[in-house]
Amino acid sequence: QVQVAESGGGSVQAGGSLRLSCTVSGHISLHKDCIGWYRQVPGQEREGVAAIDSDGSTAYADSVKGRFTISKDNSKNTAYLKMNQLEPEDTATYYCATVPRSCVPLRYKHYFDVWGQGTQVTVSS
């Protein structure tokens, strides 16, 4: 059974950085997977942040372009989200998700098979 676990969340001041990790277990390798990072604020829809495809191509939400970088290490079954220049508006619970197929646009969040429990990111001004 495939499981996803996020880590690396925390509290930082505006302008700071964090790196989130997404470890996938029960899976041979991520090399055929699409990995997505999403975030959600209570009372709001879960929104796509970034995704990385099996060929390494990436996609980002406009709000994080130039500040966030998604990457993955297939040998470790782990994906990462490096977040720089954090803003209070980035405060949310961040979720990682995986699907053993090529990526589709971020707005199709129901495309993903397995989701983690989330990790909280809080950015103070």
Image (cartoon, helix red, strand yellow):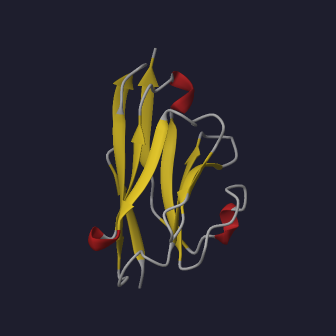
Left or right relative to 36: residue 21: left
Which residue is drawn at the image coordinates 50% and 71% (left, top)?
54
Left or right relative to 109: residue 83: left
119 vs 24, nearest the viewer: 24
Vertical placement of residue 112 versus 118, above or below: below
Residue 14 % position (x, y): 43, 19
> Would you identify the image quadrant in which residue 123 lies?
top left
**Viewer can see residue 9:** no
Residue 75 % position (x, y): 28, 72
- Quadrant location, the N terminus: bottom left
Residue 69 % position (x, y): 45, 44
Which residue is drawn at the image coordinates 55% and 57% (left, top)?
51
Residue 18 % position (x, y): 35, 36
Left or right relative to 42: residue 13: left
> Would you identify the image quadrant in which residue 113 lies?
bottom right
Q: Residue furthest top?
A: 125
Q: Give the number of callouts.
A: 0
Which residue is drawn at the image coordinates 50% and 54% (left, top)?
95
Vertical placement of residue 87 versus 119, above or below: above
44 vs 81, nearest the viewer: 81
**Viewer can see residue 100:** yes
Vertical placement of residue 53 versus 81, above or below: below
